[in-house]
Image (cartoon, helix red, strand yellow):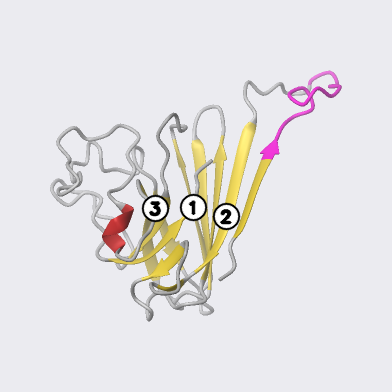
Amino acid sequence: MRVVIVVAVLCAAVACGGDTGPGDAKPSEEEVAAREIGVLAPVDAAVTAFTYDQEAAPPGAELELEVIAGDDGTTVRLSADLLQPDRGYAAHAHTDPCGRKGTDAGPHYQHEVDPAATPERPSVDPAYANPRNEIWLELKTDAHGNGVAETTVPFTFGDRVPSSIVLHEHPTTETEQGRAGSAGGRIACFTAPFR
């Protein structure tokens, strides 16, 4: 299995101590880009990227997660190569690392945690389980199984950060009361740091 971790700090000349010219923008914070690549493997052979459904998420498929934190929000981009062709996948950030079972990744990461949710009964309240408070991606693959999904959420991470991205069997995420955040079974999981 091949896993590559790259963390890059992008900064304007003023933030890095260089000279700036007239009219140069002065960012209030540095932007941090974190990127990790993992290759899906069967549960018995996986370390960071697990497939729980080898037809929908074939071993050898590559997932790349990129996280860019700015002053006012966070952009998350998920790229995939060699997944099942011409298929949609709902993907969400989860609280825990991947494991031998899909449930090991825990519930969805929520910026503002639903006080009514428990580990046994994750949030399905659209006031909390929504794409502004959680990280939802809709990945659509082409004829070669390649695709890219991106979302920007209006928050940055503090003490808590997501630990993984989970691919679900349905192509979209439900939004109605009592079903909000649901997207079917967990078919793959990628442990990836969000900073």
Query: Which residue in the protein does label 3 denote?
Result: 97
Q: Position of residue 145 (x, y in %)?
A: 50, 75
- Seen from the viewer's position, the closer of residues 165 and 4 is 4
* Residue occupying the point 79% across, 27% down: 13
At label 2, counting other C-alpha atoms closer than 10 Å, the crowd grade (few under 14, some 14-19, many 20 or more) is many
Instruction: Give the left or right position of residue 164, taking residue 143 as reference.
Output: left
Q: Position of residue 185 (x, y in %)?
A: 26, 66
N-terminal-most mark, 3 or 1: 3
Question: Quick check: is 22 in the magenta stretch?
Answer: yes
Write down the residue under mark 2.
Answer: 36
Label 2: which secondary element: strand
Residue stretch in magenta:
9-23
Q: Earlier in the sequence, mark 2 or mark 3?
A: 2
Three-letter code, disc 3: Pro
Q: In the orientation shown, which residue stands out farthest toward the front?
A: 44
| Quarter assignment of residue 89 | bottom left
C-alpha gap between disc 2 and disc 3: 14 Å
Residue 145: say if magenta: no
- The disc placed on residue 149 is none
The residue indicated by pointer 1 is 192
The residue at the point 34 percent across, 72 percent down is 52
Left or right: 142, with 52 as reference point = right
Q: Position of residue 130 (x, y in %)?
A: 29, 43
Please name which of the two marks, 2 or 3, marks the residue nearer to the observer.
3
